[in-house]
Amino acid sequence: MKQQRHDVIVIGLGAMGSAAAYHLAAKGAHVLGLDRFQPPHQFGSSHGLTRIIREAYFEHPSYVPLVQRAYELWASLEKLSGRKLLRRTGGLMIGPPDGVIINGARRSAEEHKLLHQVLSSTDLRARFPVFSPEANMVAVWEPRAGILFPELSVQTHLELAVERGGSLKFNQPVLRGDPDGEGVRVFAGTDTYSANRLLLSVGAWLGALLSGPTGSSKSNSNCRFLDLPLSVERQVLLWFEPRSQANQFQPENCPIHIWEYAPHRFFYGFPDLGDGIKVAVHHEGQLTDPEKIRREVQEDEIQTMRRLLRRFLPAAEGVLKSTMVCMYTNTPDEHFILDYHPTDPQVLVASPCSGHGFKFSSVIGELAAALLCEEKPSFDLSLFRIDRFTGSPAGAK
Ligand SMILES: Cc1cc2nc3c(=O)[nH]c(=O)nc-3n(C[C@H](O)[C@H](O)[C@H](O)COP(=O)(O)OP(=O)(O)OC[C@H]3O[C@@H](n4cnc5c(N)ncnc54)[C@H](O)[C@@H]3O)c2cc1C
C-alpha cells in the first residue's frame, strides 16, 4: 500500500482528463492521472479517427465563446507539439429552414457575428455536387469548421502533461474516491493515493463511479454516491468507399456536414481522409452499459445508413470499409456537466458531454485546471451546473 500526496488526482485520461492533466501540470500543480486503460484507446468515447469542430453552434449560442477559446488552445497545442491536430474543411449544417439545426446555427452565427452563408438547396447542389438535399432544405455554411484527430489529441495532451511534470498511471482502474477531510483518498487496485483535489473525468463510467457498486451501502461521507440522470448511448460509426466522384469527397472539396434529415433526427459525415467516407447517425442508439456494450455492428444498422446515403449523398454509398462502436454519455438536456460535486467541493466533475464534447476538450481541460486551482473561470459556466440535476448548489455541505 503506497501513500502519496498530490495537489490533484485526475481519474480518467480520455479527452477531458488528458487536457486537464496537461493544464494542471503546465500550471505547476503536482498532478497524478489514473486511467483503467492506456489512452488513447477504443473502449470509451474518444476514438474513431475524427471529430467535428464547428463554431455556429446550433445547440446553444453560449457555446460559441467556449469553442472560440478551444480553437485557440488547439492551435497552441499544435504549435507546442509540432503536430497537425485540426484540419479545416468548412462546415455545412443542412435541414429545413425552421428546423433545430438551421435555426440554431443561424442564431449562434448572428448573435456572435460569425462568418457564415445561408445556401438554398439549389446553391448547395451547385457548390457541392455530391450533396443531394431535398428541395425544402437549406444549409448554413461556416468556413472555420473542420476536423480534429481525437486519438492524436489525447496522446499529445498526455505527452505534454508528462513533459511538464505530471505523473500518469495506466491500467489502474479506480475503485473509489473518498473525501478525506478537506482532501481525497483514491483507491486503485492495491494502491491508495491522496490529494487535495480530485477531477472525475471518467466519461461513460461516471454514473457507475458516482453511484457505487450495486448493493453497496451508501455512506454519506463517500463522494462516489451521487445519482445523476445520465444515460450511456451506443453509437455506430461507418466508413464507406465512394461509389463515384471520389474526388468530390476529398477534404479540399468536401466540408464536414450535419443533416437534420427528419425533425430532430440527425446524421453527419466527413470527407475521405484516406480511410473512406465516415458517416454516423447522431443519437438514436441503444442505451447501454460501458461494461457490456455490444461492439459488433449489425446488418440493419448498416442498411439504415445506406438508406440515408442513397437519399442525401448517393455517391458515397459504395463498399463498406469498416465500422466502430463508441459511447455518448448524455444528460437529459444534452448540456455538459462541469462543476463541483454537490457535497464534496474538493471534487470536480467534468465528463458527460452528450456526444458533442470533443471539440471543447482543450478548453474544458483549461477550465477544469483553473477551477481545481481555485481560480475564477473566464467563462460563464452556468449552463453546465450540476444543481440542475441534484437540486442543491455545488459544494454546499
Ligand atoms: C461516435 C462519437 C462521435 C462523436 N463526435 C463528436 C464530434 O464530432 N465532435 C465533438 O465535439 N464531439 C464528438 N463526440 C463526443 C466526444 O467525443 C466526447 O464528448 C468526448 O470524447 C468524451 O470525452 P471524455 O473524456 O468524457 O471520455 P473518454 O475519452 O471516454 O475518457 C474517459 C476515460 O476514463 C477512463 N476511466 C473510466 N473509468 C475509470 C476508472 N474507474 N478508473 C480509471 N479510469 C477510468 C476510461 O478508460 C477513459 O480513458 C463524439 C462521441 C462519439 C462516441
Image: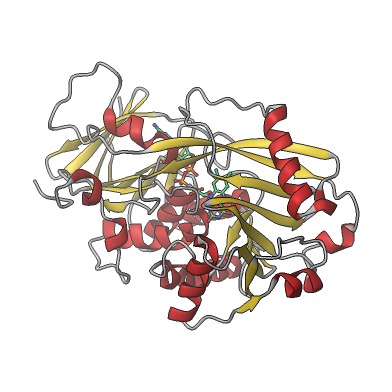
Q: Looking at this rendering, what residue extends furthest in the right direction?
A: 244
Residue shown at the point (15%, 43%) measured from the top left: 343
- Camera-nearest residue between 373 and 71: 71
Residue shown at the point (85%, 53%) measured from the top left: 315
Query: Residue 86: horizontal and vertical position, in percent?
Result: 63, 64
- Camera-nearest residue between 264 and 164: 264
What's the colour scheme? secondary structure
- Camera-nearest residue between 395 and 101: 101
Query: Residue 6: horizontal and vertical position, in percent?
Result: 29, 46
Q: Is residue 280 visible?
A: yes
- Camera-nearest residue between 214 and 367: 214
**Which quadrant of the figure has residue 34?**
top left
Residue shown at the point (49%, 53%) measured from the top left: 356
Query: Residue 31: horizontal and vertical position, in percent?
Result: 36, 49
> Where is 359 relative to 231, above or below?
below
Quadrant where the N terminus is found in the figure:
top left
Q: Is residue 277 visible?
A: no
> In screen coordinates, is 95 left or right of 346?
right
Q: Looking at this rendering, what residue extends furthest in the front direction?
A: 136
> In screen coordinates, is 88 left or right of 386?
right
> Where is 248 relative to 143, above or below?
above
Query: Residue 182: horizontal and vertical position, in percent?
Result: 13, 45
Q: Looking at this rendering, what residue extends furthest in the top direction?
A: 215
**Which quadrant of the figure has residue 297?**
top right
> In screen coordinates, is 210 left or right of 95?
left
